[in-house]
Amino acid sequence: MEDIHRRALTESITFLKDNLFVKGVLDHLVEENIITFDLKQLINFAVTDGDKVSELVCMLPKRGPRAFDAMLKSLRATSQEHVAIHLEQKAVEIKENQDAKTQKFVHQWLQDNIDLSNDAAGQCTMVNFESLLDAVNMALNASDHLTESVTATDLKMMLGKAFQLSEIAMNQSPLPFVMKGNLQIHQQVAVSESPTTSPDVKHLPKLMKDWSVANVCLWLEKIGMDGDVCKQFIQHKISGKALKLMDKADFIEMGLILGDRVVIIKERDKYLKEERDEYLKDSSCLNQESASEAMASASVKLDFTSVEDSECISLKSERDGINPPQPLKHEIGSRQFASLCSDDISSNAQYFCEPVAEKDSCVEHHMDSANSCDSLQNQEENKTSQTDVSENIPSSSAPNAEDSNDKSEGLISDSVSETVETGQTSSSKAIEESLITKFKEPSEILRPFGYQLGFEFEYKKDAKLSCVETRSGGNLLQPIHRFVMPALDSPEGMKELANEAIAFASACLNDRANATIHFGIVPEVSSGFTVHGQIMGLHLKKNWEQYEKFLNKAFAYGFSELEIVQNCISSPMFIRVASGDSSNESLEYVIEIDVKPKYEYSQNKEFFIKLKGEKDDAEAIFRIINGDVCRLQQPQIDFYRQELDKLAKERKKQEDKAARKNCIPRDHLCEKFINLLCDGDTKFQGDQYRILVLNKPDETVDFESFKETFDFLADIEWKAIFDFDADAKVCRFLQERDYMMKIAMSDDFSPHSKYNLQKIDRLKQTHEDIRNSLNPTWIFVNGYAQNNEQKLDPINWKMEKSDGFKEAVRFFSRQIPQRRALVVFLLLSEDTKVVIEATEEFLTSFPNQWLCISENESIGNPWLQELERRNCMERGIERSVFGMPWKHVQEAIAHIVTPRRMDCCELPTSTGTFIVLPKKVMNKFLDLEILSSFECDSSPITSNIQELNIHEVKEKEMFFRGNGVSWWNFWFQDQVCSRDILHHLKKDVKESFDDDDDVGKVILRHQPGAGGTTTAKHLLWELRKEYRCGIVQSINEGQTAQQIINLYQYEDNRPTKPVLLLLDNPDEEKANLLVAELSEMAKSLTRKGGDQAKCVCIFLICLRRTEVGTDPRRLVLQHQLSPVERKWFLDMDKQLLAKYKQAPDRFMDPKLLISFNILKENFNKEFIQRTVRSFLDNISDKKELRLLKYISLVNSFDLECRSLPTSAFDGIMIDNPWSKRTLRRGRHAYASRWETHLSSEFRVLVNEASKPSMGYIHALKVINPLLSKEILLCLRDAGSSRIPVSEIALEFYKCADIFYAPSKARDDLLEISKDILKKRGRLPNGRPETYFAPLIQTIVNEEIPEKASAVLEIGIQLTSDPFIAQQMARLFIKFQNWPEAIKYATMAIEQKPDNSFLWDTFGRIYERQLLEQYDKLVAGTNLLKVENSASIIDIALKGMEMFRKVQETNDREKTLATNQAGFFGELQMVVCLLDCLTYFFPSKDELRHFILEAQYMPEDYAALQNIDGNNYADKLKQLNRRVQTAVNRLEDELLQLREEAIDEFGRNHIKNQSDSLICLKENLNSYFGEDGDSVPEVLKEWEKCEFRRRRIFRLAGFNLRSIFDLRHKKDGMDILKRIRDIAKLNIGSDQVKVDDYQTLISANLALASLDSEYRIKFSEYEDMLLWTKKLYELRDTSFVSHLEPYLFFVMFNWPRGTMSKQLVNPRVIEDAIRNWKDAYYKKYPKQRGEGKPFRKKDTTMFFLGNGSNMESIYSQFEETAVARNGSPLENYWRLPSTMAKLQRLCGTLNQDGCQVKIQLQSGEGNNASIWIPTSFPIRERRMWNKQVYFVIGFSWIGPKAFDITLDDPRTVLQTSRDGSPPRNFLGKEFHRTSKVVEVTEEHFRQELENFDKKLQRIKDLKERKNRSLNLTHEENQLLQEEDKIQKEKDRFIQIRRKKMESRIPEF
């Protein structure tokens, strides 16, 4: 499809969603063969019509050039003419816009660059500007370049062609114009492309790779191609380099016909062969001259092309039978020399293990296929800047793949040895001389192993060297070094020299290990090992030749086999030591001997030796043990002989492996494989999505073969693996290698499979699990033997399994960004029949994004031919690698990726020891990152000094640039500043270990970028050896908590220390869920001996907040460093600067370490501004600036500061990103991987990282949150005026190229983009920081509301997110646009009707409308007639209805968040409505009578009984009932349920609710309560009772909480007694109700808890028993749901020996407990299900006491058991005071430890056995089914058993210091009344009246003054205060309004 048509579709997507009927169109498109039936099903699988349109629009551009026309035809065939016309017009509009822009650009460019004057042209010409413009346009049109993207380069190329296609070019040889400035245009372009020109081929460059596009056209004309072919080559910009790389598929893609393709390929190959043959003749001319030039180069650069070419030629010539010269021993090749010639030789040591190409034997080679070595050269030449040799030449790994990087600092010999090992050295003498020249200064590094450098090479005296005396990881080829300092001035010293040399050589030969012994270097020993050496030198008294002869004789004496000495032990080398002191003329040397036990000579031999000074027949055998040369005793010799064969085989294996690695098979197949796998690069870069497809391996392949050939499968990150092997051989192999995966069946993806039909949401859950998994999904496509699913033949597979398989492939195609996939087929056997059937789906879903590999062509070719026969692919497509051995594949991949390594993880135990956490076990902790107690210590890199130093620099620079802190940063000790707050944080954490909570929490609040996460990780690092530490990476319901428990208990029989885990800025809901789940699980844990585990886990919670407050009780980290911290950063800056100046090639310029510098400058805003501007000024690429603008926009307003997926921005960074011709894979895709070509300035500001998303993907993020805002501001100020934020936001959200193509990356970006529209930050007090999300709030503050609504509107269209619609409704509420607010609130509710928070927003629309009416009434602008109040009442009633919806949905929601806004909102609506109605009624008392008295209906208000069919009067009289219901629910829930939260919001919102309830009750009391105790006598009895109840309501309320609250008031005792007396009067009446009994009992309990005398003298206990029975019997008569009737009835009538009278049968108690539980769940539906995380804890308020009557009720409110004196909680039950007060019963504990059986027996002999739950499960099995002792507490769900023991603890009393019980143990401290001042409407009106009186007085005085009447001094002063009084009045009204708005707390 053409780009114009694609754009027409994408830019019309909103129109199409609203107007297109998809169903009919699809059928026509199927008929037209545009889409397949499967694609039609895929589109229909979308949920909504809009999604179907999106799928279709996404799919059409890929369906060929006819797709757009077929779409128009289908539209017209389905009567959708208007849609077809719209698309046609849109395409025309796009085309005209492109043409206009191109014309404008061409016109301006020609004017700026072309001079048509006669003088300029140098001749008289008739050419004018218009004719030139027409000619250029003609040329552009002919070349299909008339597009929006035409560039100046295109124009320069087309200028010459313009004269070929226009009449003005006739008979004119020179161009009739000149170019202005320095612009050049070659006439050769015009000449070469002219049909009349006779090309001179001699002018072509000699090498095809040097040809330009014009040269290619000349060559084409020579071989007979016509102008159309040349035009195509010009259009595709085919240069000589490209021509060499092109294969048949490329020519087909260009559109060349078969005949032209055949001729071009044949002639090209012919030319390349001639070119190669010519070069072979001239190869002898390539002598030392070129090497000398390289040595002389100051910058030490190499011609990459020549090195690569020559290297390839050497390999190719071997294949062709040409024998290159054999290398000379001890000489270094050109590449090694290049490395040595660099400024820092140690940094280039790794290049000594490169494969060596012999310069004098190499010939230039141009391969005859598309995969020549020049492809590497082409890539390097495309790089934008010149790079050092160390950058251009890819390094080779060490011989052992697992130790590829193990090289010690300064040990060049370690690297070079591996080159020598393969025998590949240079024969050029100039190279050796160059190396010597390099070392003309005394060296501080060791001589390269295996090289004799001559006497010019010297050591520097006193230099320190690293030493490795033990091998790392069993690498026998890695040389070990031994330092010895013998005294040669005596015979004993000479004997020591000989014996050390012989013994060391013997040990190395027996170990089969490469090694060097150095005499003259002093060893420095640490912990028994030599870690350093200091060069001192040996003073030789004689000529060095004599010492050499002495040592040679010693070896001849010591070894019996002279051949071994000659071939495995080098002659002694004497290296002079330069002292640097010119006055010192003595000569000192280091003597060095290399030992190289090649398998060719050593084989299975034992090497016994004789030492000087011992008996002649005394032979000994030596080995290196723990760094020492040790003589073996007989048992050790016997053991060595057993291991010798294995050791020899290992030596041979490593030699063979090194030979293969040091000579990567750069033949056709290897190059092709690497190109296809790495996008034309030599390693993986950027964002890549790979899928693996496997068939069944050959039956002969065993697991040992897998280890040798398929280890690479675990080293590559796969997004999915499709396995056609039912036996799962490869899968089981990788599982044994600890490769983590998620196993699935193909049927799991089919919506029609029996698995998914059984459970509706299973398919959706499968998709989500895969999308969020960090591990690949292993999908068994054709059976799985482990599940008893056998493999099927192709026919049955197609019928039974293919549907699920296709759905799986399509699922991944939707998740992977377009053109970024690579499907890798590994054909392991000839069993490919089913694979062939499945391949078509892969090729359809991922066109041109596949690679097939097979070891045998006999397997691969039939597979390929069958696919071609089926027309699944075009013939000749070169995307397969057949015939490459699997070992070669593994070795090639070893050079692409680093082998997977997993360091050993150790955990501390309670006893102080450490245990190893096996990899298989650690892999089960998917949600946790576990910190090892010895993290980084066991890494192989720590044993390699050089590599460790390089790694240290790398880690420091990454951290200081802004990457997250790694554990290595702490390991290196000086890279992380120890913040002052760390000490306080550690103190709080350790104190939490001793708390009594099952799960502890320590909270650190920090501003973004202040270092909070780093500080938290620093604490983990310091405590890692004491506690099991880690980081919670993700939270999954049920799984994460169980993993924490498993970590806590792992291999520790008696865990006494909790786990310490970091929660970094967690999602509040998920974090609360985790804490709740973990608390439930922790309750069931016991330690050995039966003690309850004190604390299982401490969560260190980092909360990122814009404002953190200054409360000294909180741990906060702000954008402010202390003086000590600032000094650390300044000192570190000096160190960094000094290192950079000393070695700028090794260390980064400190100015580029932005994140570090921000802290160093103490978050100075001016510094940040200067830094941002300086880097932005150097970014010129418009695409990069656009990308940076979008990233900074999102990062600035994303509260979580998340990274953004790179591939989501493909659409804006690639031209025609969704075009079929835009290759993202294969060797041509290098330039399309834009993320690898970003400018250095961009990379300084933006970090590249991996982001968890279906594994890990490439992501981008501004390095610091402070920078992102400054970058956005600078980009906004880039023009003449500041760009509004809304304009950038609209541009971003409307960008179809970003949000057009569905993928997981797009979805991740969309999720973040949604959050910045709806998520709000929170203040330290827990309230929202802003009214809207930061982005919307910024737009509202800086611009106009309409701009904010426009951004939200586009967000709704893009995401269909109901919560963004909610934000839109809130925006319109804020600006009082009620119709629009209702519209969007309705939209949100329709999408998510079961969300209470959305209903809350709907309710607040009416609440604010009501407040608006109230404001008008206060201002006096409303008509005060009763009929006019109907609209106000209607608003209030609608709002109350919405808030009742909140109540209903909240009870159904299975979430931790409890939304009580429904009850608060309803009460607020009642109060505000009544406040408004006071303006319509003569007085407040009149209004009270009207709403409280059912029969009271004055004539003036009768109209309210029928207004538009609504009886408003009746609804007003029902308000009292609604108020009592809502108040009771709120007070009950605050009392009866306990809630835990992780942050300040969770804790403060409970207090906010209490304060809001107090304010509301104060207002409600003034309407529904009575002011006096005296009851008017004129009232009837039922009216008197109602009056008394209203009086009690005014004094407290009917709820137990409100009554007990009075105990904390100053006059609380008196009020309680008044309530008691008032309630008694009602109980004596025949109009008594439930509330009366409940109030009286509650008042007596409160009084008894306050006054012990009252409790002792209480004489109405038997009446209390009767009242509880009456209360229980009347419980169902109340319209309010109460639990007190059950509590009081069971508690007071519980059988106990101290009772004087038993009124209730125990069986009735049993029934009451059962009914109690049912009532509890009916009142609190969310509480159903024991152990559910969203279930709150029910409060236990009373206990059964030891006393009689009222003393038998022990109230928690008397002495709540929260420890304040430091007593351990478990000791509370043993305190004498507790033992004396609480009654202890006995019963039987059931078998699961969750219930206790009690025998209840009354005084009359009635008994019953009942079961009551335990307070927590008892898991100690020894207590089950035995008699136990316990205390009974009465919670709000029924009685529970506490403190369960086997023995009666009353037999042993524990004493305490003061005898008082600890405080507040059983629950939270009971609520104390807050000091909240609330102004009622009555008080407000009085105060308002006072203001009005003063203002009226002033008005009167003004009139008097106008009449010239005299005023007193006081009256004149009053006149002057008019403005002040008016302002005070306005402020008073504003305060009142704010208080009214704040009555509903935020939820």
Image (cartoon, helix red, strand yellow):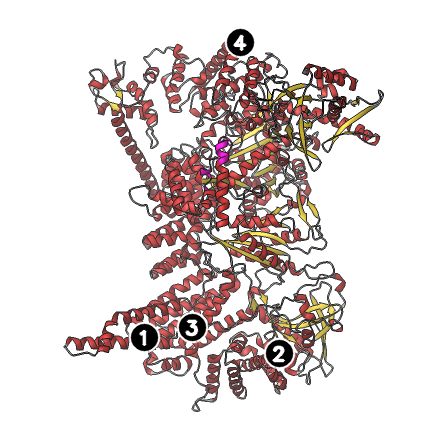
Pinpoint residue 1683: horizontal percent, then vertical percent: 57, 74
Distance, label 3 to label 4, CA atoms, is: 102 Å
Q: Amino acid at mark 3?
A: Val
Above or below, comparing residue 1146 to residue 56 in the picture: above
Above or below, comparing residue 358 to residue 109 in the picture: above
Q: Which residue corresponds to mark 2? A: 1689
In front here: 719 or 298? 298
Q: Which mark is residue 1888?
A: 1
Number of marks: 4
Pinpoint residue 495: horizontal percent, then vertical percent: 76, 22
Range shown magenta? 1138-1154
Q: Amino acid at mark 2?
A: Phe
Q: Which residue corresponds to mark 3? A: 1877
Q: Which comes before the other along the chain, label 2 or label 4?
A: 4
| Left or right position of 552 against 1672 | right
Which image quadrant is residue 557 in?
top right
Q: Which residue corresponds to mark 4? A: 284
